[in-house]
Every structure is written in structure tokens, then in C-alpha cells.
Image: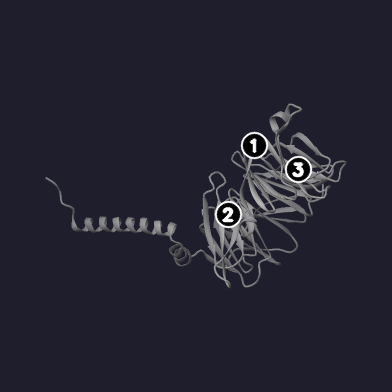
Amino acid sequence: MIKKLSKKKLIIISIILCIALLTIIFSILYEKNDTVRVFFDKYIFRKNVTENTLPSVSIQNVHSFAFKDYLVVLDNNVLDFYNKSADKSFSIEDVEIADPIFEANGDFLCIAEKNGSKIYVISNRNIVWQKNIEGQISNLSINKNGYVNVSISNTSHKTICTLYDENGTELFTSYFANSYIIDSSISNDNKFLALAEANFSGITIQSNIKVISIDKALVNNEDTIYYNYSAPADDFIINIDYFNDNLLCLYDNHIDIIKDKTPSTITNFADNNILFADMNNKLIQVEKHSTNLLSSEFEVQILDASNLEKKVYTLEKEPKSIQVFGNVVAINFGTEILFINNSGWLIKSYTSSHEVQSIVLSNEIAGIIYKDKIEILSL
């Protein structure tokens, strides 16, 4: 004999089914419809926050950086790590740096003295290694495994690059007699070191990408160059970054991707009205579109380097700058900052009564910097 469901159970099941159906419908609308997404972000998820409503750290003439879910403040040779609630979690003393260069990847934080000689690598609340390097440190890079490339200048060469492993052991050194290293990137499999160099000695600027095989360099192989590419004259290289096995190259007028030793242009700034461009795990650019003689609209375009799939976030006004880290893009309008992810969805909107001085950014937090304080925004 088949039991009939009670009226009460039927009502409960009907309610559950309706909730599930509405959840699916609103999820689809949220993903596909910009108007619905803006409404939900503002009134349901309440992603809008304002100045003086967030935890903050009082500051005066300090240097700061966002590392994982910490705000890092360097003051009088002490690194203080503040959590999302602006409480001091721990400190690291005797970090003897006055003007720092910060770089972070995964669980590793690297700090060096700009135009100085000291360098520190930090992980798990401790200094893993530190060194005094001969020459003046101009830039550095670190991969998620803790490998560090340090570029130094003002020696007998224009630039010298030294690669260190996660324990601070020197692996090899590369010398550049006529060019400066603008940026570097270490592949996450520890197999390649890519160097972006620029030569200013001629009538035109010559930018080159040199990829060194780390395995060959470790056994003193004479042929350590895995790939070498010379860009067209006056194409100035700004930034390079490994994305999986591909190398992304940001120039002042275009973005290239190098796959299997073959460069190809993803976007050309002259062909499009690109205002800003940068790279994190994706290619980020802001493009201006004229809607009529008196008005324009602006798009944040997020491109997947592997397949050129594009996500778009439309802006109502022109931004002053963008900043990227990991999976986060910060769009700065001066007194308003939008934080979006690599899927083109809003994470948070921050509004201030006066212009923000600067931003420090990680995947987990943003530090909103003013003259006398840093507000910590959880992302």
C-alpha cells in the first residue's frame, strides 16, 4: 500500500523546490545580466563599503605591503604583520632596510633595499635567508617555490643577475655589459629564468627577452640560452610574467605571448584605445569606447592568455589607474575604488571622502593608504 504524503510534507517539499528553483534562476541572472548583478551586489550582498567603517592601522612615514591575509608595515627596521582586524599578529625584527622593494609569491615574501645591498626572504613568520650583496639592487623576482632572481647595477657591468634557490644558495650569475634588466620571471617548475633587458646606448631603444635554462646553467653548460627574442626598435619592455608554460610580455605599446619559442601579439594599443594594461594571472586592459561626441564608456577587459577568452566589466567613468595582484584587479577613480576578480565580477566597492593616496593588494586583502592610516579591506 502506497503511503500518501501529508499536506505539511507537501508544503515543505514545495517550498524547498521553489527556493532551489529561484536560486538557480537568480544565479543564472547574476552571471549573465549586468543590471541584476549590480542590484544584488549593492542591495543584497552589500559589497559597498566606505571610509572609516573598516579596521585601520595608524601610520606615520612607514612602508607597507599586502602579503597573503596580512598588512605588512616596515618601520624602524621592524616588520609588523597585521591581520584583517588590524590586530598585530607578529613582528620580525632587525630587517635593516630603509627604502624597500617588496615581492611576494605563494608563501614567500622577499624584501630588498632599493639601490642598496641587503635582501631578506621570509616564510612561515621567519627569515629563511638574508644576504648582503655587492652592488646596488635594482629589481628582483620570486616564484612560488622561493627561487629569487636579484638584479644589481653599478658594477663593472650594466647589470648582473644572480639566481638563488629557496635556501639562499647561489645557483648561477648572468652578466650584461650593455643592457639593463627591466624585469625578470622564474617559471614555477624552476626550469627557466626569463630576463627582460633594454639597451639604451643606440639611437633607438632595443628590448630583448632572454630565457635561460636553469638546468643547463647548473651544470655549467656553455649553451644556457633556451630562447632569445629581439623586439622591434623602440618597443620598450615593461613587465614579463610566466603563465603556465607561456611567457607574457607587456610592452609600452602592445602585449605579446611567447609559446614554444614563438611570439605572437595578443593586443596592440595603437589599434585599440587602451588606457591601461597590466598582468596578473590574466591580461588586464582598460579600453575607452566613444559612444557619441560628448560621452564615452570604459571597459575592463580580462583576457585568458591561453585561449584569449575575454571577460568584460563596464565602468561608468574613466579610472585614474589600475593595480593587479593574483586574481584581483583594483580600479582607482580617486575617491572610489572597485575591486573585481578575474571573472569580471565585483568583489568590493570602496568609497572615500577624499582621495586615496595609494593601495597595497593581495588576493585576500587590500590596504587603503592615507597620510595617517591604512584601512584594511577583506576581499
Which residue is labeled 1 in the image? Answer: 261
- Give the mark nearest the N terminus, 3 or 2: 3
User: How did the renderer colour the structure?
Assistant: one colour
Instruction: State the residue in front, 94 or 335.
Output: 335
Residue 204, compared with residue 210, is above or below; it is below
Q: Amino acid at mark 3?
A: Val
Task: Say above or below: 141 vs 368.
Answer: above
Q: Estimate the x, y position of residue 360 in percent, counting from the top left.
A: 65, 57
Q: CA distance from mark 1 to mark 3?
A: 24 Å
Secondary structure at numbered mark 1: loop
The residue where tag 2 is placed is 328
The correct choice, above or below, for 350 with respect to 65 in the image is below
Residue type at mark 1 is Lys
Residue at 77 percent across and 40 percent down: it is 161
Name the residue at 24% across, 59% down.
11
Q: CA distance from mark 1 to mark 2?
A: 29 Å
* Residue drawn at (14%, 46%) of the image: 2
Residue 361 in view: no
- Mark 1 touches mark 2? (CB < 8 Å): no
For residue 87, what is the image quadrant? bottom right
Q: Amino acid at mark 2?
A: Val
Using residue 1 as the reference point, say whether residue 358 is left or right of it: right
**Residue receiving disc 3:** 150
Left or right? Give the position of 60 relative to 2: right
User: What numbered label is drawn on residue 377?
Assistant: none
Marker count (numbered): 3
Residue at horizontal 74%, vertical 29%? 223
